[in-house]
Amino acid sequence: MEEGGYYKHWSVSARVLLRYKIGHASIIATYEKFTSAGSGFLAGADTQAARLGYKRPLGRTWEFYGDAGFSNNKRIQSLQSTLLGAVNATSYDEGSAGAIFRKHLGRSYDFFAAYRFSEVDFITPGDQPVDLPGSTGRIGLRHEGMVGVEWHPKPTRIE
C-alpha cells in the first residue's frame, strides 16, 4: 500500500461474448477478465468470470432465461488492507445459477418470477475459517427469489 491509502496496480481487461441462435432459442456465453473492487470481500481483486445462459420463448407471451456462472477473484493488495474490513483470504471463487420466467403483459409491462443460488468459497492462508454472517466457515451460500412487474415506457425522441 502506498502513502495516502492508494494502491497502484496495472492489469489487462478483456471481454468475449458469443451468441448463438438455435431455432427460437439463444445461447449466450461470456468470459471476462478485469480488476474489480473485490465485491466487499477483498480490497481489490483480479477477476476472471465465465457465464453460460439460455433464453427461449415459451409460447407467445412467456419467456424463460436460465444461466450458470463461475468467477475466480485473487487478492491484489496485501493482508495489511484487511484492517479496513476486507476478508483475510488470498482469493475466493463464486458459482451461481438462476432462472427467470417472464410473462409479457402488452407492450409496456412484464411480470417476472426469478430465483438465484450462489455459493462463495474463500481460499485463506493456512486454510483458516472466514467469519461471515450465515456462513459455514469458508463457504457462504445465498438463495434469492423475486417477483415483480417491469415497466418499459415507449421511447420519446428528444430534439
Image (cartoon, rainbow, N blue to C red):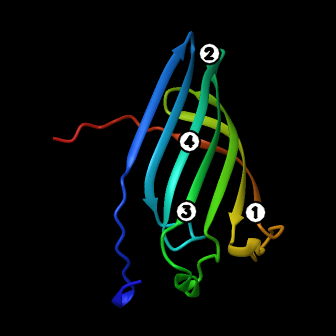
Q: Residue at x 56, y 9 (%)?
A: 23
Dot in front, 2 or 3: 3
Above or below for 121 versus 28: below
Give the amino acid type for the residue marked by disc 2 in the picture: Arg
User: Which quadrant is the N terminus positioned in?
Assistant: bottom left
> Do labels 2 and 4 touch, CB within 8 Å?
no
**Residue 8 sits in quarter:** bottom left
Above or below for 42 versus 50: below
Please name the residue that numbered disc 3 is placed on: 74
**Secondary structure found at label 2:** loop
**Secondary structure found at label 3:** strand
**21 vs 125, nearest the viewer:** 125
Q: CA distance from mark 2 to mark 4?
A: 31 Å
**Secondary structure found at label 1:** strand
Please name the residue that numbered disc 2 is placed on: 60
If you read the primary sequence from the N terminus, does the residue marked by circle 3 or circle 1 appear first? Answer: 3
